[in-house]
Image (spheres, helix red, strand yellow):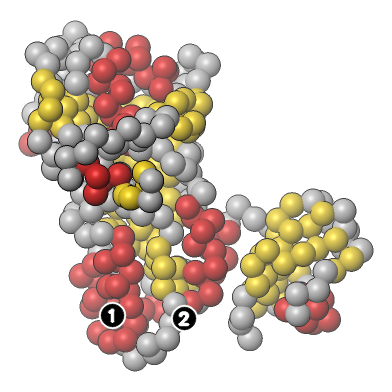
Amino acid sequence: MHGWIILDKPLGLGSTQGVSAVKRCLRQGGYGKGIKVGHGGTLDPLATGVLPIAVGEATKLAGRMLDSDKVYDFTIRFGEQTATLDAEGEVVATSDVRPTREALEAVLPRFTGPIEQVPPAYSALKVDGERAYDLARAGEEVVLASRSVTIHSLKSSPARGGGPFASANGGGGEPLGDSVEEAPLHHPADGPPPRAGEDLEEITLTAHVSKGTYIRSLARDIALALGTVGHVTMLRRTKAGPFTLAPAISLDKLNEMGQAATLEQILLPLRAGLDDIPALALDPDQAGALRQGRVLAGIAVDDGQYFAMLGDTPVALIEALDEQVRVVRGFNLD
C-alpha cells in the first residue's frame, strides 16, 4: 500500500483524526499494522474538504503538500468578529455596517497578489515554544508577526452577488482552470441572491492561495476594508496541491471499504502527488545507483526535479543540475 487516499474531511474531524481513521481501516482490512500514514496539510476541525492522506512511501512526499497551493470556498458573515475569526469563538466586535456587492467587488483586488497577513491568535503557530491557540485560550494576549503570502485569485460567487475574478493588476483576472472544482455556492433555501445595491449579510468567496495563508485572517481583513467586521461561517477546501474533490471519499465510505478490504480501489498512485513533475526513465544500472544514493553523471536533461522510474516502478524524486542527478527522496519499492 503506497499512494494517496483523499478524504472529504467532515466537519469536526481533525487532520490527525483523519490519519488515525485510515490507520484503523488498514488494520481492519488486514493490510498490516506497520504501514506509515501521514497527512498532506492540516485542515481545521471546523473546515471540510480535501485532506490528502499519504500511505506507505507516499509519506516521503507529504512535506511537498505543505508547500503546495490550496483552493478554498469560504463564507464571510458581516457584522460580528469573533475571537477565533470563525463561528466557534465569542463575539469580540460588532458593526451595523453591511457592504454592498459593488463595494465588495471594489476591494477584492486589494487582496489579490502578494499581501501581508497577520495570522489568527487562535492558530497552531508557536510563540516562545507554545502554541498560539493555547496561549489565547489561557487568556494571554497573543501578538503574531505578519507574514507574506500570495492570493493567486479571489472571486465571489456569481450566485451570491459576485462578479469577475479579481487580479493583482486590477484587471478581470484569470480563472483557476478546469482542475478546480466549483460546486454551486447558492441554494434556493438561502433565498434569492443579492441584487445590485443591496446590503450583504454574508458572501461566499473562492480563493486560490499560497502555503501559509489563513482564510480566517483574509476574511477579517476583507471585512475591515469594507468598514465593518466579519467572521468565517463556512470553510471548504476544494483543492490541495494536485488533489481535488473528484477522488475524495467520505469517512463512511472509507470505513466501508476498510471493512471490505478494498482500499486499494481508492488508493491513488504515488505519482499522483507529483503530477507537476516530469518522469525520467532509468535503466536498471541507473536505478541501482540511485537506490544506493550515488550521483548519476552525464544525464542530458534540463535542470530541475524529476520523478525517476524503472519501468512502472517509482525509484526516487531527483534533482538534475548540470547533467548530474541526485536523489531528493528515494522510494523503497520493488
Residue 228 position, x and y percent, is: 19, 16
Q: Can you say which quadrant of the picture contains the C terminus?
A: bottom right
Asked whether residue 233 is in view, the answer is: no
| Residue at 15% over, 32% down | 82
Q: Is residue 194 above or below residue 252?
A: above
First reached walking from the N terminus: tag 2 or tag 1: 2
Say which of marks 2 and 1 sits in front: 1
Amino acid type shown at disc 2: Met
Residue 320 position, x and y percent, is: 79, 57
Tell me if 20 is positioned left or right of 268 in this view.
left
Q: Secondary structure at mark 1?
A: helix
Q: Residues within 10 Å of mark 1 (few under 14, many from 20)?
A: some
| Residue at 60% over, 52% down | 276
- Mark 2–mark 1 CB contact (< 8 Å): no
From this viewpoint, which residue is outermost toward the top?
A: 197
Q: What's the mark number on residue 222?
A: none
Tell me if 94 is positioned left or right of 25 in this view.
left
Viewer-closest of 169 and 210? 210
Using the numbered discs, state the Cα–Cα distance from disc 2 to disc 1 in whole angstroms.
14 Å
| Residue at 53% over, 16% down | 169
Q: Quadrant of residue 35?
A: bottom left
Residue under pointer 2: 1
Tell me if 150 is positioned left or right of 133 in this view.
right
Residue 83 position, x and y percent, is: 17, 34
Residue under pointer 1: 24
Q: Is residue 189 above or below residue 98?
A: below
Residue 218 position, x and y percent, is: 33, 29
| Residue at 23% over, 53% down | 45
Asked whether residue 292 is in view, the answer is: yes
Amino acid type shown at disc 1: Arg
Q: Residues within 10 Å of mark 2 (few under 14, many from 20)?
A: some
